[in-house]
Amino acid sequence: MTKRKYVIFMLGTAGSGKTVLTKTLYDWFDQKNLDVATLNLDAGVRKLPYNPDIDVRDLVNIDNLTEKLDLGPNGAMIASMDLIATKIDTIKSEIDYIEPEYLLVDTPGQIELFAYRSSGRLVSSVIADESQPASVFLIDPSLVLRPEGFSSVLLLSISVAFQLSLPQIVSISKEDIIEKEQMENLENWIDSPETLLTDLQGSGQVTLSQQLGMSIIEILEQFKFTGELFPISANTGYNIDTLVGLIEREWGERDDFYE
Ligand SMILES: Nc1nc2c(ncn2[C@@H]2O[C@H](COP(=O)(O)OP(=O)(O)OP(=O)(O)O)[C@@H](O)[C@H]2O)c(=O)[nH]1
Ligand SMILES: [Mg+2]
């Protein structure tokens, strides 16, 4: 009988901290002597802070691809994900060979590449297949300084969850660099959609934007438990226990995380 597998996909906008979180979570599981492995799906990354057990850069050479097909950086990333999709059987057999209990999947910077293109969705569904999947959607604090940005990025997270059909936990990354005033705003918006609405209305938007803002908040209230949205820092480890606790809840109760 095959072992039960748990998979965590790191998702989020470019530069939101997916790669550093992959390393931090790897260390978290490893320190608890849990059987954990990492999979890098970013063919374009130059340097990683962790040593991936499975690395798509072994299958796809982005520089060759760029030169051979005469592509720009985005075209090369699209072509690389298409090529990765054609090699998904190899990736799957590598996972089956290592057979980790926990697999951490670092995804490419361009979220649309992974969530909105059929090749990315195929790759994620094959990796998640026969396992207990979860995903962490990271929100970069620099994108959510304004209430419009906060609402828009949350909408993006819903859209990504909709596309990938993966259970999703949303966290604001880089807590260690969030200024006090921004943290207060974020806490208010998370705790009370009314405050978010007031701040949207108060920012001098035209009526159409206000209406759109209200509709967005209704969607957020229906689909997001914004009360469970919280900041983390992969750098300092802040709230990483809480994050794993919520992932664990998605998987069902697991006592063996804690001695
Ligand atoms: N201060 C702080 N910086 C962070 C944290 N996590 C990531 N960073 C920094 O944010 C930048 C981007 O981090 P990455 O982990 O590479 O982000 P990513 O989402 O993997 O980026 P792409 O794959 O290029 O989209 C790097 O300079 C990191 O050092 C954090 O918790 N705190
Ligand atoms: Mg990365």
Image (cartoon, rainbow, N blue to C red):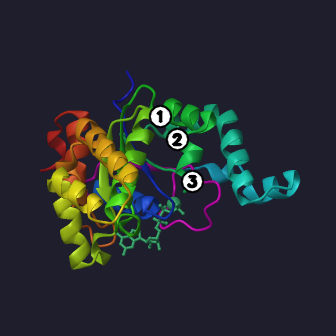
Q: Earlier in the sequence, mark 2 or mark 3?
A: 3
Q: Is residue 162 magenta?
A: no
Please provide percent x and percent y for residue 259.
12, 50
| Whether residue 118 is situated above or below residue 246 in the rendered picture | above
Q: Earlier in the sequence, mark 2 or mark 1?
A: 2
| Whether residue 197 is situated above or below residue 131 in the rendered picture | below
User: Which residue is nearer to you in this view: 168 or 198?
Assistant: 198
Q: Earlier in the sequence, mark 1 or mark 3?
A: 3
Helix, strand or loop status at disc 3: loop
Task: Name the residue carrying label 1.
Answer: 163
Amino acid type of the residue tagged 1 in the rendering: Gln
Q: Dot 3 surroundings within 10 Å: few (below 14), some, or many (20 or more)?
A: some
Task: Name the residue carrying label 2.
Answer: 115
Task: Name the residue carrying label 3.
Answer: 110
Magenta residues (range): 30-53
Helix, strand or loop status at disc 2: helix
- Marks 2 and 3, how far apart at CA: 9 Å
Predominant SS of the magenta segment: loop
